[in-house]
Image (cartoon, rainbow, N blue to C red):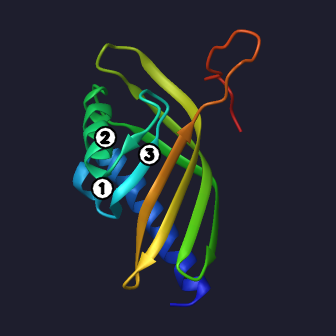
Amino acid sequence: MNQTDSEEAIKTLIESRAQAVRDKDVERLMAQVDPSAISFDVVGPLRFAGADAARRRAQEWFASFAGPIEIEIRDLHIEVAANIGYCHSLTRIGGTLAVGMKVDMWVRSTVCLVKRDEQWAIVHQHTSVPFEVKTGRAALDLKP
């Protein structure tokens, strides 16, 4: 697999994960997550260790929405070197929470991958929101 093929494979993986979020399909979302993956999410705790913890978090997240989850990935940038890859993007999340509140926010997303047996696996995921230094509150109204 050459670099262009690897970049395309990672792009396809990211697009598949976005569709899995839209469909609330935990199994498809987790399909390429390595068992030892570490995830940093916008909610506590500080980290989720292992694919099982990431799976439980995804199940909770999906259940927190009353209906579909909207997701838009913008400015996806992919870098690949041999069997290591990473990508980052701005990601919009929207929808209505089970408590009735509407959500429409942009987050920053980074995914780190390793290639084993010609397959890419996610070993680290990081999602964050910026915050206002003066107030300490999340800046959920920022847009690209």
Mark 1 or 3: the one toward you: 3
Residue 13, relative to residue 42: is it above or below? below
Q: Is residue 102 above or below residue 88?
A: above
Give the mark, 2 or 1, whose residue is nearer the N terminus.
1
Residue ID for mark 2: 58
Instruction: Please rate how many residues cluster around mark 2, counting C-alpha atoms within 10 Å: few if below 14, some from 14 to 19, many from 20.
Output: some
Question: What residue is shown with label 3?
Answer: 39
Q: Quadrant of the C terminus?
A: top right
Give the numbered dot on residue 109: none
Which numbered disc, 1 or 3, marks the residue that appears first in the sequence? 1
Gap in angstroms between the C-alphas marked 2 and 1: 9 Å
Q: Residue at image x 36%, y 45%?
A: 49
Q: Position of residue 84 (x, y in %)?
A: 55, 73
Judged left or right of residue 116, residue 127 is right
Residue at image coords 31%, 27%: 65
Disc 1 residue type? Met
Which amino acid does the dot numbered 2 rest on?
Answer: Ala
Res 30 label? 1
Residue 80 locus on image (x, y percent): 61, 75
Q: Position of residue 143 (x, y in %)?
A: 68, 33
Q: Secondary structure at mark 1?
A: helix
**53 sits to left or right of 11:** left
| Residue 33 position in % (x across, y down) | 35, 60
Q: Is there CB contact under 8 Å for labels 2 and 1?
A: yes
Secondary structure state at the residue bearing disc 2? helix
At 35% across and 57% down in the image, what residue appears? 36
Task: Determine crowd level at label 1: few under 14, some 14-19, many 20+ residues with C-alpha closer than 10 A.
Answer: some
Distance of label 3 from label 2 (alpha carbons): 11 Å
